[in-house]
Image: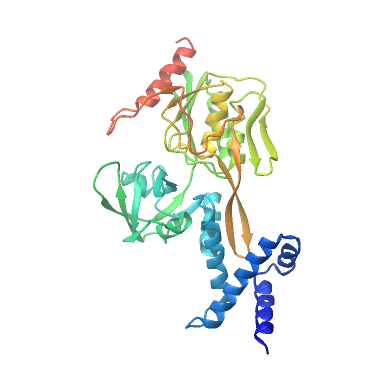
Amino acid sequence: MSRRKIIVAAILLVVFTFTVTTAGFLYLLRGNSADIVSTLKFFRALQIVKARYVEPVDTDTLVAGAVKGMVSSLGDPHSVYMDPKMYKEFMVETEGSFGGVGMVLGVKDKTLTVVSPIEGTPSDKAGIKSGDQIIKIDGNDTKDMALDEAVGKIRGPEGSQVTLTIRHESEPLKDVVLQRSNIQIKTVSGKMLPNKIGYIRISMFNENTGSDFNQKYQELEAEGMQGIILDLRDNPGGLLEESVKVASKFVPKGPVVSVVTRDGHRETHSSNLEAVKYPVAVLVNGGSASASEIVSGAIQDTASGTLIGTKTYGKGSVQTVLRLDGSAIKLTIAKYLTPNDRSINGIGIEPDIKVEMEKDATKDIQLDKATQFVKEKLGK
């Protein structure tokens, strides 16, 4: 067989293995010349590695590496390739429980950073704080490590241990040994404070948050709630749809958030609330990100409540998960805008009333301020 025929056969085989045989050919047919050349370059590189590498190598392994590199080249820490193991863990987390140490991670200034620890989990009990940087995981440097790869390394069977090398502010690096546990995520808690001020804390937004929030809200109303404090501090976000359900209890009829794709298509999620029922204070800080910023941004823009605390994280992009035969790509597909068309990505939201928490504070002065604020609104 001639060399040319071998190359053509290899291309056909790879396209078939890639599980997008028909779609791949249609892409080539409708693509411009640069797209066609680039695609053929990829297939050529794949054929060379398969044919010439010193050891036999599986095609699936090469394709997975290529897809991972492709997504990584976007330079977006929120767009990641998830192998089957990572994808399974990701789906478990959004459903409400997983094995790990209980922290939500992000990438800030190109460094793996704790967005927030989850209340009552091993990371929370060990004193890990929002903003702490994770320099190593079990001795492995996290520099250039993909976000979901880092998450996969930190998670593991219940009872096993993981050692994290942490940098807290300007303090020296320290190793923190954590024992993994089964993390059950109860995202909503609340109680009635003095003067009939309801307090609801949301730790993140998973698929149960909207209904759990409504239940707690109704319980407090039945107890005679006259004002409310919504605590979104160290809330790393989650599902956009659930954040809209929560915001719809505070934001008057109209837009809550608009999702805008690169072609300009705009999808607006709205509230049907006839009128704001209670004075509202919303607690935010640097660990308040994504879906929690949707809620706080909508409340601030519509003047339906007052934000108290410190500036939020600044994640104003929307991701979707696209399956790839067992694995998946989590891809940034849009940005979101607050009701006043603000994009807060990389910027964050400044609170209406700034209250800094003092280091090693024994009192929650932010909550105290919010309580005082609502009490004054009630004329008490």
Tell me: residue 335, above or below residue 139.
Answer: above
Q: Quadrant of the C terminus?
A: top left
Residue at left offset 46%, top offset 27%: 350
Q: Is residue 244 above or below residue 9?
A: above
Displayed quadrant of residue 58: bottom right
Q: Residue 373: which quarter of the image?
A: top left
Q: How is the image coloured?
A: rainbow
- Residue at x 47% of width, y 41% of height: 236
- Res 270 seen here: yes
Viewer-closest of 28 and 165: 28
Q: Residue 294's image quarter?
A: top right
**Residue 13 in the figure: left or right of residue 365:** right
Residue 300 locus on image (x, y percent)? 54, 24
Residue 358, how many percent across, how many down?
30, 29
Q: Is residue 138 left or right of residue 45?
A: left
In the image as oriented, which residue stretches furthest toward the bottom?
1
